[in-house]
Image (cartoon, helix red, strand yellow):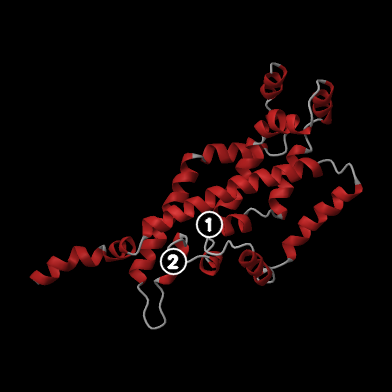
């Protein structure tokens, strides 16, 4: 009984001890790097693409948009081998940039979100920038980009769980030292034995950062998602700031 009472706290928290000793905090840091890089690069590239496609002013705009929609019906397993060969040929194997590029390559849903919102911005704003001597990049940096908070919040709310919980790419492209937290949890499952206590402890702790993000920014996510595609959320102050440059 004395031995049982002495070992009871160790048995209760053995799962947390195990994952901490296996580099849990390092894996969380890897996951943060991959997630932040994917959201930042993917959001920027998607905004750039959507700014061109919004309005469908040329025939090839709709064709490119349809290609993005076609990607919804192509399973990721079909493109797994070509992506692996591309990553190896670029020398990005076992590098965080490999997962960042794979996650930031764009998709149908982000393109739909940003294209629908940018299409509500009057084209006269771009024409006014040209009249004032600006170019497309001036319009993008000083008017378009500052007003992308609404669709970007929707993009983050949809993309963040997928990037954070992506275990397959972490196992396929990264070594244990650079793998995300989901790959670390998966490594606790063996052929002949599985440490369920450590797995469930790892799953619990891996979900905590997502819960904290959604609890802190839930009002922003809800308000911005409701306002997606509504021109009333356009921040006219960015236009005033541009006029004062």
The quarter of the displayed image where residue 137 is located: top right
Q: Is residue 196 above or below residue 64?
A: below
Decide: few, some or many residues near mark 2? Use Cα within 10 Å; few <14, some 14-19, many ≥20. Answer: some
**Residue at x 36%, y 80% (from the top left corner):** 193
Residue 147 drawn at (x, y percent)? 67, 32
Task: Decide if residue 212 is on the left or right side of residue 68.
Answer: left
Question: Which residue occupies the foreground of this view, 81 or 205?
Answer: 81
Q: Looking at the image, which residue sits at the far top?
A: 244
Q: Mark 2 and mark 1: span between their CA atoms? A: 12 Å
Residue 11 drawn at (x, y percent)? 23, 67
> Does the residue at mark 2 contact the one at mark 1 (Cβ under 8 Å)?
no
Residue 43 drawn at (x, y percent)? 64, 45
Question: Label 2 belongs to which residue?
Answer: 176
Q: Is residue 2 above or below residue 238?
A: below
**Residue at x 53%, y 57% (from the top left corner):** 96
Quadrant of image for the N terminus: bottom left
Question: Label 1 belongs to which residue?
Answer: 96
């Amino acid at each position: 009984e004395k031995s049982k009472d002495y070992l009871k706290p160790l048995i209760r928290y053995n799962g947390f001890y195990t994952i901490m000793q296996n580099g849990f905090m390092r894996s969380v840091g890897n996951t943060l790097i991959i997630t932040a890089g994917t959201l930042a690069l993917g959001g920027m590239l998607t905004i750039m693409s959507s700014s061109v496609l919004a309005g469908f002013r040329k025939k090839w705009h709709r064709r490119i948009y349809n290609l993005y929609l076609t990607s919804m019906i192509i399973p990721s397993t079909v493109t797994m081998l070509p992506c692996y060969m591309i990553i190896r040929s670029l020398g990005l194997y076992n590098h965080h940039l490999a997962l960042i590029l794979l996650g930031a390559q764009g998709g149908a849903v982000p393109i739909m979100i940003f294209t629908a919102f940018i299409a509500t911005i009057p084209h006269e704003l771009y024409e006014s920038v040209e009249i004032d001597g600006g170019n497309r990049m001036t319009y993008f940096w000083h008017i378009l980009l500052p007003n992308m908070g609404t669709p970007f919040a929707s993009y983050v709310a949809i993309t963040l769980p997928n990037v954070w919980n992506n275990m397959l790419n972490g196992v396929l492209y990264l070594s244990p030292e650079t793998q995300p937290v989901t790959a670390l949890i998966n490594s606790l499952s063996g052929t002949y034995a599985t440490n369920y206590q450590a797995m469930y402890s790892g799953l619990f702790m891996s979900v905590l950062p997502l819960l904290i993000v959604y609890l802190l920014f839930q009002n922003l996510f809800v308000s911005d998602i409701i306002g997606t595609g509504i021109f009333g959320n356009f921040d006219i102050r960015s236009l005033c700031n541009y006029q004062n440059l």
